[in-house]
Image (spheres, coloured by chain):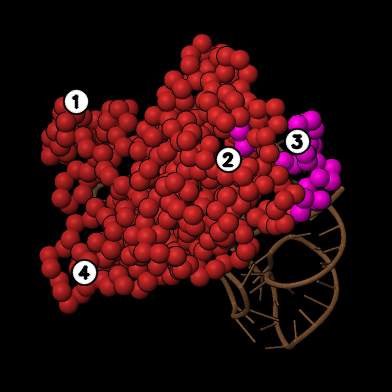
Amino acid sequence: MKIYSTLSAKKEQFVPQGDEVTIYVCGVTPYSDAHIGHAMSYIIFDVIRRYIKFAGYKLKFVQNFTDIDDKIIDRANRKGIAANELAQFYSDEFLADMDALNVVRADFYPRATGEIDKIIEVVQGLIDNGYAYEADGSVYFRVTKVADYGKLAHRTLDSMMAGARIEIEQDKEHPMDFTLWKASKPGEPSWTSPWGEGRPGWHIECSAMSLKYLGEKIDIHGGGSDLIFPHHENEIVQSESFTGKKPFAKYWMHNGLLQLGEDKMSKSLGNLITIKDALKEYNSDTIRIFVLNSHYRSPLKYSLEAFQAAQSGAERLRRTVEREDSAGNADNRLDPEPYRKLFIEAMDDDFNTPQALASLFDLARAVNQAADSGSDISEAKKVLTELAQNVLGLRLASVSYEENPEIQKLIQERANFRKEKNWKEADAVRQKLADLGVAIEDTPTGVKITPLKKK
RNA sequence: GGCGACGUAGCCAAGUGGUAAGGCAGGGGUCUGCAAAACCCCCAUUCAGCGGUUCAAAUCCGCUCGUCGCCUCCA
């Protein structure tokens, strides 16, 4: 298996450091509903995680909630509720969204506010060994102390200084020094520390939680590419300076960002579509195929057409898996192995999901072909289902209308008209069903009911 | 201004030296009471443009144009 690491800027052979693959993926700052850019990122890491497991590794997966920061405080103040209440609400919403997208839950979801002790320990350690300094109740990281600062973003301190919009803060020794611990203003949530009342800065919580839950050297650290600098860069210097051990993470993985129109979708730009909104129109398989149909490192543009294409594709896979096995024709068995092999080759090459998906569509065609000609498709269907569900996280679930008496009644009516060869009335009933949002198909084994396609 | 990425059919999108995957849409057919689904056939002599290296380039190099990301909160 090969993985592209941002740190080395190339594909590397994946060799875990221990028996258990350790993965840390940066989570959200919960102050508003998650949008489909978040969905993209977490679906990608979900598939990465599923595939690593599929490949036979044991793994431990941690994702944080950064549940204290300026925006949470602002938003909570505006709503007139406590910061922790707001953060709790949106954390729960986030998990609900992930469940709806069929994203497997992490083994641990630590929260910044729940790990203050560890955070203080790391900050104190950094002060003790000279990498950080206290000023006026806040603590800053001394970037000039680290020779390789910028190694992840592939920049140097000097190049970052040139033309950068950097606010000069008097307490800082160097403009690029960043906050580890922030002295709190009156009325803000705060915790007692050796430097007075305050709260963690952004970045430090991830170092602390990663160290606590996964150890000093982890295998994979991931997140959106907008986190490369400064977030992940700073995590590296904090962690490595604290432990004295390198590398903090062996493989740094970053997904491209979802664009809406010409800009990336982001909370601060306000150009977003929430996961909840997307799920009103499309199921999780559609959203997952939309995401997985392009490579995770490339930017992805949101468009209605792309969503509809994904929906049609998802539908085709689902239908294929639902095809009936023809009576055991062992002489004429479809062998899924070549397709399975292609799928694995694609995934082994830095999680090339578009190519893996292509092999699944090829397999689906072969299954339909074989089914049409009466060959044994049981094995092939099993493989298709396994790869789609276990690795790509598709549900391939059909909608049942058994429990809907209105629809059942219309179906029966239409069956009667058809028996009488009263096609006109039969078609009228079909139209009624269409108005209810369902399409019907006459098959040799009976009537098939499906949700009407959105056009 | 600095750093980086990208530009492949109507749309989305793989492919990093050997002659263009896949999905969607579209056209034609088989099947069907009609449909739908499924299947078959067709749909880029060409990969932003211009030069160069090579027996051979979408793939390597240079330049030009365009787009995006990061440098500030962000998945």
Among numbered discs 3 and 1, the one appearing first in the sequence: 3
What is the crowding at mark 4: few (fewer than 14 residues within 10 Å), some, or many (at least 20)? many
Rendered location of residue A236, percent (x, y): 60, 51
Residue count near mark 3 (Cα–Cα under 10 Å), binned few <14, some 14–19, many ≥20: some
Give x and y (percent) for residue A301: 59, 44
- Lower sequence index among marks 1 and 2: 2
Q: Which chain is brown?
A: B
Residues tagged by mark 1 and mark 2 found on one chain of the structure: yes
Task: Report the magenta residues as a range.
Answer: A156-181
For chain A, give the colour: red
Residue at the image point whose x is 57% and y is 31% from the top: A194
Q: Secondary structure at mark 3?
A: loop
Q: Tell me the number on the disc at residue A375.
A: 4
Q: Nearer the viewer, mark 3 or mark 1?
A: 3
Instruction: Indicate whether residue A174 is drawn in magenta.
Output: yes
Instruction: Establish if A40 lies above or below A385.
Output: above
* Residue A200, above or below A53: above
User: Disc 3 marks which residue?
Assistant: A172
| Chain letter of the residue beneath label 3 in the structure image | A
Residue situated in front as seen by the camera: A31 or A140:
A140
Q: Which residue bears the numbered disc 1?
A: A406
